[in-house]
Image (tube, helix red, strand yellow):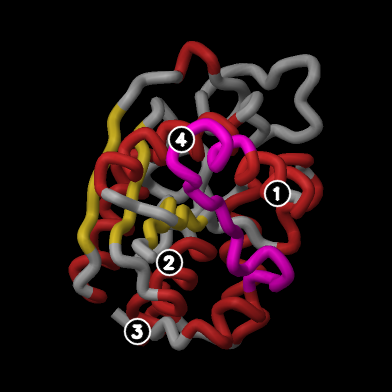
Amino acid sequence: MKTALLLSGGMDSIAIAWWKRPDIALTLDYGQHAAEAEIKAASVTCQTLGIEHHVIRIDCRSLGSGDMAGTEADPNAPSSDWWPYRNQMLISLAAMKAITLGVTHLWIGTVKSDETHLDGTSGFVSRISDLMAFQESGMVVEAPAIELSTSELIRISDVTPGGLAWAHNCHKANIPCGSCRGCNKYFQVLDDIGYDLDRSR
């Protein structure tokens, strides 16, 4: 078995990297506004943990919507951070690279709170895994933290406060805006787990 993690540089995927220690991490710049900060967070995480890291760049901004793309939200959007078919897109792009590296199991950073979107549910993960396995070489897609809240994941992951301090959850920019859904989640989780990141760097 050879594993790869779709490592966005946010709290969830960084905690999974510390917890599961994948063989490879894949980070995507698909045109999202916070791409460079996400890549930096992912790169530092991989350097710290000794994980082979690949960055994939492909500009899909013209297909995006809302906060992440820096545009008005699509009329179909259930929330401001919605990007149509985003997880399907990211998994497909990551798998295109992963298959060339001999990966058999592709992990994604979905957690329990992501079930507010259909592509954050166990049903979606099961279906996309079946499709990937059917199409090319039996690759399996898994979400190891899908039954956990972010706080629960962090607590079992052994990620250090310093390791978590690198996480970039902002949806709008490379410098956290402090007001988007991603930033709000970041602050709420830190409060819940009692981390003081000012003392952790």
Alpha-carbon distance for marks 3 and 4?
A: 43 Å
Residue 19 placement, left or right of 76: left
Instruction: Determine contact: label 1, label 4, CB under 8 Å.
Output: no
Instruction: Determine contact: label 2, label 1, CB under 8 Å.
Output: no
Mark 3 or mark 4: whose residue is earlier in sequence: 4
Give the residue pinned by disc 1.
Answer: 126
In percent of the image, x 33 and y 24: which residue is there?
58
Give the residue pinned by disc 2.
Answer: 14
Q: Can you tell which of label 3 and label 1 is closer to the viewer?
A: 1
Give the residue pinned by disc 3.
Answer: 200
In percent of the image, x 70 and y 72: which residue is there?
148
In percent of the image, x 40 and y 69: which residue is there?
17
Mark 2 or mark 1: whose residue is earlier in sequence: 2
Q: Which residues are magenta?
A: 131-150
Instruction: Determine contact: label 2, label 3, CB under 8 Å.
Output: no
- Does the magenta portion include 146? yes
